[in-house]
Image (spheres, rainbow, N blue to C red):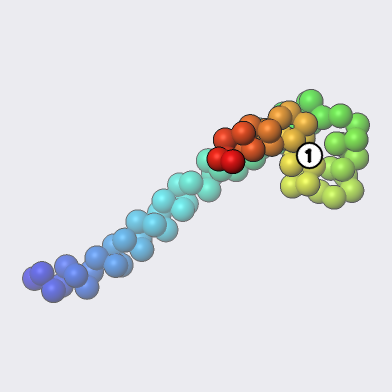
């Protein structure tokens, strides 16, 4: 019986991970939509131009840098 449980455990774990991936996907999509909504409300004309030319990732990274998220990340890292 114990041997059967050892053989079954990896498949149960894999099934659980797949289920959690499906649960997480809509939650992360909502977070991205909120970021884009905030970006479109508060972006400068230069950032909007970057959004059109280079895409979402580049424009959001510039937007976050302008808001100071980059400074916060650098201050947290040990020197």
Query: Residue at image x 91%, y 40%?
Result: 49
Vertical placement of residue 58 versus 73, above or below: below
Location of residue 42 (image quadrant): top right
Dot 1: element: helix
Query: Residue at image x 73%, y 28%?
Result: 67
Residue density around tag 1, few if under 14, some if 14–19, many if 20 or more, within 10 Å: some
Location of residue 76 (image quadrant): top right
- Percent x, y for residue 44? 86, 29
Residue 58 left/right relative to 17? right
Query: Residue at image x 24%, y 65%?
Result: 9
Residue 61 left/right relative to 29? right
* Number of numbered discs overlaid on the protein picture: 1
Residue placed most toward the observer, 4 or 60: 60
Residue placed most toward the observer, 42 or 70: 70
Query: Residue at image x 81%, y 48%?
Result: 55
User: Can I make out residue 51 in this image?
Assistant: yes
């Amino acid at each position: 019986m114990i041997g059967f449980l050892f053989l079954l455990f990896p498949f149960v774990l894999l099934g659980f991970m797949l289920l959690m991936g499906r649960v997480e996907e809509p939650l992360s999509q909502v977070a991205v939509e909120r970021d884009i909504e905030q970006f479109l409300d508060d972006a400068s004309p230069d950032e909007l131009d970057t959004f059109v030319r280079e895409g979402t990732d580049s424009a959001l990274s510039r937007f976050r840098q302008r808001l100071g998220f980059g400074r916060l990340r650098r201050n947290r890292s040990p020197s």
